[in-house]
Amino acid sequence: MTNFKQIDRKILADLSKVSEKNSFINPELYSKYQVKRGLRDLDGRGVLVGLTEIGEVHSYILDEGEIIQVPGRLIYRGYDISDLVKGFTEDDRFGFEETAYLLLFGHLPNQKDLEEFNQVLAGYEKLPEDFARDFILKSPSKDIMNALARSVLALYSFDTNPDDTSINNVLKQCLHLIACFPSLAVYGYQALSHYHGNQSLFIHSPRPELRTAENILSMLRPDSNYTKLEAKLLDLALVLHAEHGGGNNSTFVTHVVTSTGTDTYSAMSAAIGALKGPRHGGANIKVVRMFEDIKNQVKDWEDDEEIERYLTQILTKDAFDRSGLIYGIGHAVYSISDPRTVILKDYAAKLAREKGLDNEFNLYTSVERLAPGVIAKFNKMYKTVSANIDFYSGFVYKMLNIPVEMYAPMFAIARIAGWSAHRIEEIVNAGKIIRPAYKSVAQRQNYLDLSERI
Ligand SMILES: CC(=O)SCCNC(=O)CCNC(=O)[C@H](O)C(C)(C)COP(=O)(O)OP(=O)(O)OC[C@H]1O[C@@H](n2cnc3c(N)ncnc32)[C@H](O)[C@@H]1OP(=O)(O)O
Ligand SMILES: O=C([O-])CC(=O)C(=O)O
């Protein structure tokens, strides 16, 4: 057995070298053929690939053809996110369901619309009989995003009409997914914590009278208790994560996969896979882990030079996960600021004060202030970088006692609303499969018989 493993490892190592060598493309060729890497122009502007009415991510203005970076704005269906947040927080209402309604149907719900919508979601939140036992608890995964994607794919089998892409059917499927993502994710976590973490197993059912944020906390906690303040803060986080235009990676994946004509479960599981990545929604988990490392490595949290030295080690791949990335900093579109971070940071500050975590909050603000300068020393920058939403979200979740494995799933529970709206928009407007071009830069070769190959 050991021998086999050793041989296996050697073969794999050799094959990996060959694979890596023969996958390399000379970076100069990208400029030669004017390939827009990351679907971005050299100045950072995204290549225009679609139109949407759902979300707008605004970060610059053009002045006589010149890009002027401005503080970021996020607009859902024409409404500025800060106005939406102000509206429901000042009225002391939950905002996530109202936001999901707005994204899906294009207008703000009135009282009656909202009550009806809450009832619809409550009616859809129940999982099929024995689904949790057979599909979640029986094979617990160490990664809740993978568990969530698997559950979404498994739901296909319980749908009597899964491949029907009429809007009526797709809307029904999307509403079902929006309603049951909290249970799918939380049960995935409970399975992990029980089978891999030796903790007692709790499976609490969602309660129809509770809103999404309340249900998440009630299902996560053994005693189901939470304060109104905790639920409101989580609700705010869900609203801020619900949508980000058509170009963010997971939503673009939703458009790409939807354009093939495939079913809702396939499209949404692909989007979950995209969101999980540490350069996208998975960054919130990385940020909190990176801060655990910073807290251990940096002795004086008030010493800017010591913090900068550590951040430099991250950039040079000598610290943390050796990826060279300072997580939670930078954004494909925003430069001066991410409007969601501005809102969340304010709440993070208040909560940190309440919980006696001012020191840790101050460390976050120091990293936020120092990281852009460190990154600029190592890269050619076309725009400044600033903290993105993932920078403070994990810290907020941590203060809400939400387990770290649930941070990226929390993003998915919110973003399924945006993905759903984009899937419907793609189906209503498209009819064309998304298929960009790749130029082959391989040399043509004459075929060799097996006996002739060296
Ligand atoms: C919800 C979300 O998805 S928000 C994003 C969450 N992701 C993270 O927080 C991960 C850390 N950040 C990053 O990896 C990047 O900033 C991204 C992926 C978000 C955006 O990347 P880009 O579009 O390449 O950003 P931008 O053009 O501003 O970057 C310029 C250079 O700085 C580098 N850079 C940007 N941010 C960082 C960072 N946080 N750490 C290290 N280097 C960075 C880029 O890699 C790029 O270098 P390159 O030209 O050699 O490729
Ligand atoms: O827009 C992006 O590229 C990433 C992002 O912030 C999001 O999806 O929320």
Image (spheres, rainbow, N blue to C red):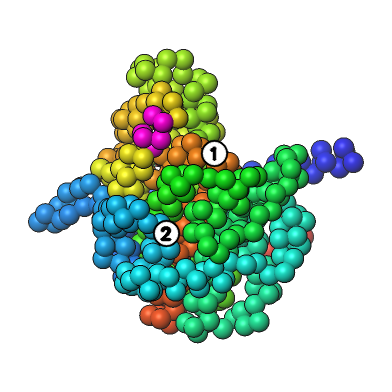
- Among numbered discs 1 and 2, the one appearing first in the sequence: 2
Is residue 28 part of the magenta span, yes or no? no
Crowding at dot 2, Cα within 10 Å, few <14 / some 14-19 / many 20+, comes out as many
Q: Residue at x 26, y 49 (%)?
A: 72
Q: Residue 241: horizontal and vertical position, in percent?
A: 41, 54
Is any part of residue 257 visible from this angle?
Answer: no
Residue 121 in sight from this viewpoint: yes
**Neighbourhood count class around disc 1 (C-alpha, 10 Å): few under 14, some 14–19, many 20 upward:** few
Which quadrant of the rendered structure holds the N terminus?
Answer: top right
- CB atoms of marks 1 and 2 within 8 Å: no
Which mark identifies residue 280?
A: none
Q: Which residue is mark 2?
A: 96
* Magenta stretch, overall SS: helix
Which disc number belongs to residue 401?
Answer: 1
Going by the numbered disc 2, the residue's amino acid type is: Phe
Q: Give coordinates of residue 356: x percent, y percent.
A: 44, 26
The front one of 21 and 320 is: 320
Residue 51 position (above or below residue 366): below
Identified by mark 1, the residue type is Asn
| Residue at horizontal 26 percent and vertical 62 percent from the top | 79
For mark 2, give the secondary structure: helix
> In what element is the residue under mark 1?
loop
The region drawn magenta spans 348-354
Q: Residue at x 52, y 77 (%)?
A: 172
Q: How far is mark 1 from mark 2, CA to CA?
A: 20 Å
> Measured from the top left, where is residue 159 in percent x and y?
64, 77
